[in-house]
Image (cartoon, rainbow, N blue to C red):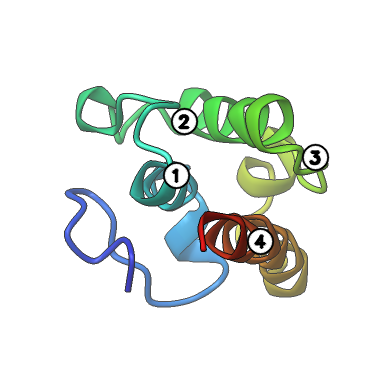
Amino acid sequence: RKTKDKKNCNIENFHYSFQDGMAFCALIAAHRPDLLDYDNLDPNDKAGNLQLAFDVAEKELGIAKLLDVDDMLDVPKPDERSVLTYISSFYHVFSQGKKNEV
C-alpha cells in the first residue's frame, strides 16, 4: 500500500518483486523520504539499489542485514521467507515510529 504510487515498484510477491531493490527503497522512501532519493534510482542497477536499501536500513533504521545482495541476485528466485522476515523488520521499526509520534 505504501509503495503503490512509487514508479518502478510493483509489489506482487515476496521474491521477484524485491529482486531489483526498488521495492526495498520504495518502502524506506515511503516512511523516511529524507534517507534516500528514490526518484533518481536506476531500476537497472539492481545490486546498487539493494546495497543502498540494506545499508540505509542498517545504519539509519537499525534494521539488521538479514539479506545481502548475493541472496537476492545469485539465485533465480530469492527465498520468499527470508525476504518476508526482513520486510517484517521494517514493519516493526516503522510501526514503532508511529507510536512514538502520538
Report how far apart the C-alphas of labels 2 and 1 lie in the structure: 7 Å
Which residue is depicted at the point 30% across and 24% down?
37
Residue 45: where, in percent of width, then height? 39, 26
Report how far apart the C-alphas of labels 4 and 1 lie in the structure: 27 Å
Q: Is residue 7 above or below residue 17?
A: above
Q: Nearer the viewer, mark 3 or mark 4?
A: 4
The residue singled out by tag 4 in the image is 96
Task: Name the residue furthest front.
Answer: 102
Q: Nearer the viewer, mark 1 or mark 3?
A: 3
The residue singled out by tag 2 in the image is 49
Q: Nearer the viewer, mark 4 or mark 1?
A: 4
Mark 1 burial class by Cα count in 10 Å: few <14, some 14-19, many 20+ = many
Q: Nearer the viewer, mark 4 or mark 2?
A: 4
The residue singled out by tag 1 in the image is 20
Kind of residue indicated by mark 2:
Asn
The residue singled out by tag 3 in the image is 65
Q: Is residue 8 above or below residue 49?
A: below
Mark 2 burial class by Cα count in 10 Å: few <14, some 14-19, many 20+ = many
- Contact flag, marks 2 and 1 (Cβ < 8 Å): yes
Q: Is residue 87 above or below residue 68?
A: below
- Contact flag, marks 3 and 4 (Cβ < 8 Å): no
Residue 6: where, in percent of width, then height? 21, 52
Residue 91: where, in percent of width, then height? 62, 65
Name the side, left or right, on which 24 lies relative to 12.
right
Residue 83 or residue 102, whichever sits in front: 102
Report how far apart the C-alphas of labels 1 and 3 lie in the structure: 17 Å
